[in-house]
Image: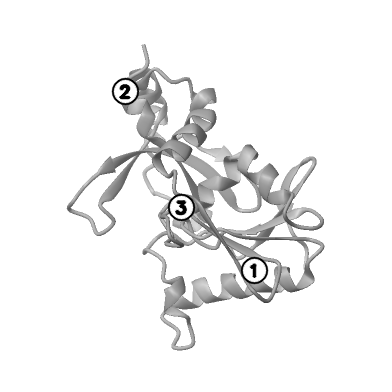
Amino acid sequence: MTDPRSSLIVPLLKARVPAEVQLEFPLPADEEPIRDPFAADLYVTYALEVADEGVPSGRRYEHVARRHCAELGVAPGELRRRAVINLRDLRPELSLSWYPDVRAVTVSLGGSGRRGSLESGLLLDEGFLEKLAQDVDGDLVVAVPARDVFVASGTGHPDGIDKLRWAVTQVWAEDRGDDAADPAWDVPAGSLLTHDLIVRRPGGWDVLSV
């Protein structure tokens, strides 16, 4: 029987941790968060999104390990599909803000153009990606420099690709506290993901070459 808490499972994208900074004492196998490879240095984990007034965002995330799957009544292989469905239900206010000067768009899950905390999880939503790909020329290209940032364009829009690289630079500069950074790209601590742009091709996602 499926536990009602399974409706709280959401996708969390993360970046691979270099071997030299991994935990000295690894967790037991059944306690390790389930990880699915994605593209570049990104992988997908899954978590229960729990309301918590004690944290600034009002939400905290409890990672799903194999032992939790049995408790929740969800097979590990079903986590991705379940997480995508839940993301749509938990974040129904999706907004697209197209830049006026180039063919590029920022996607937000907070409503009214405000970023939420799970925008990068949209990389798993094939239905949404297919629709977005129809709005750009060439293959869909996405920047997810942080967990709550999703900016997209197409390979047929060189100026749009430049805008994605600019967004990546802004997000990482803001995290470093650079004076030149735009505060609009402020991101929560620990949410940075990757400098790479990734491109959606028929065979899957890959890093966009320079």
Residue at 72 percent across and 50 percent down: it is 133
Q: Which sits earlier in the primary sequence, circle 3 or circle 1?
A: 3
The reply to whether residue 184 is in sight is yes
Q: Which mark is residue 4?
A: 2
Q: Is residue 71 left or right of residue 191?
A: left
Looking at the figure, which quarter contains the N terminus? top left
Q: Which mark is residue 54?
A: none
Q: Position of residue 123 (x, y in %)?
A: 59, 46
Q: Position of residue 55 (x, y in %)?
A: 22, 55
Displayed quadrant of residue 161:
bottom right
**What's the distance in space between the residues labelled 2 and 1, CA to CA?**
39 Å
* Residue type (three-letter) at the residue carrying disc 1: Leu
Q: Which mark is residue 109?
A: 3
Displayed quadrant of residue 99:
bottom right
Residue for badge 1: 164
Q: Position of residue 13 (x, y in %)?
A: 50, 48
Q: In the structure shown, which secondary structural element does the residue marked by tag 2 occupy?
A: helix
Q: Which sits earlier in the primary sequence, circle 3 or circle 2?
A: 2
The reply to whether residue 33 is in sight is no
Which is nearer the eye, 9 or 39? Answer: 9
Query: Residue most toward the top?
Result: 1
Residue at 49 percent across and 87 percent down: it is 180
Query: Residue most toward the left?
Result: 54
Which is nearer the eye, 169 or 37? Answer: 169
* Residue type (three-letter) at the residue carrying disc 3: Leu
**What's the distance in space between the residues labelled 3 and 2, CA to CA?**
23 Å
Residue at 41 percent across and 54 percent down: it is 117
